[in-house]
Amino acid sequence: MRAVLAVLALAAAGIASPAGSAGTFPGRVCAAVAAHAYGDGSYRYAVRVESGNVSCASARAVAKAFIERSANPHGWACFRGHQGQQWAAACSATSGAFRGSVVRAYLLGKV
């Protein structure tokens, strides 16, 4: 339950983050991923490790898995962004070596 509350707090914090171009968001930039989503094609997403020590390879895999399957990867809790949030998906590690790390994916456009 505490992990869920912590993740909800992290997601809510995204609402208050400043709007801007993809270059203004906090964290470490990873290579973009292409993911098939919503049954209407593939989209590109910029991936960022916004806190924690997650490798870009792991961050990209987690973001892509959640976007494509709408299911939390093992050890992660993920949410979709809505309305005023700049990110399309946010994931927080709930266990293991990456616990507390935050990864976000930002929509770049259709492939």
Image (spheres, grey):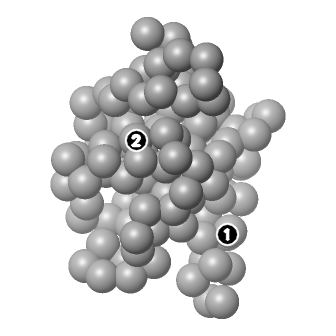
Q: Which residue is mark 2?
A: 64
Quick one: SS at disc 2?
Answer: helix
Identify which residue is drawn at 71% across, 59% down.
Answer: 12
Q: Residues within 10 Å of mark 1 (few under 14, many from 20)?
A: few
Pinpoint residue 38: horizontal percent, then vertical percent.
Answer: 63, 29
Residue 103 is left or right of residue 58, and the answer is right
Q: Which residue is mark 1?
A: 9
Q: Residue at x 52, y 47 (%)?
A: 69
Residue type at tag 2: Lys
Give whichever of discs 2 and 1 has the lower sequence position.
Answer: 1
Picture layout, residue 107 above or below residue 12: above
Q: Secondary structure at mark 1?
A: helix
In this rendered view, identify the residue nearer to me: 71 or 97: 71
Amino acid type, label 1:
Ala
Name the residue furthest bottom. Answer: 1
Q: Quadrant of the N terminus?
A: bottom right
Which percent across, then down, holds residue 15? Answer: 72, 48
- Quadrant position of residue 102: bottom left
In the image, residue 94 above or below residue 78: below
Q: CA distance from mark 2 to mark 1?
A: 23 Å
- Using the image, determine if residue 18 lies above or below residue 97: above
In front: label 2 or label 1: 2
On the rendered structure, is 32 left or right of 102? Answer: left
- Identify the disc placed on residue 102: none
Instruction: Report whether residue 58 is seen.
Output: yes
Question: Which residue is most to the front?
Answer: 39
Residue depicted at x 60% and y 64%: 10
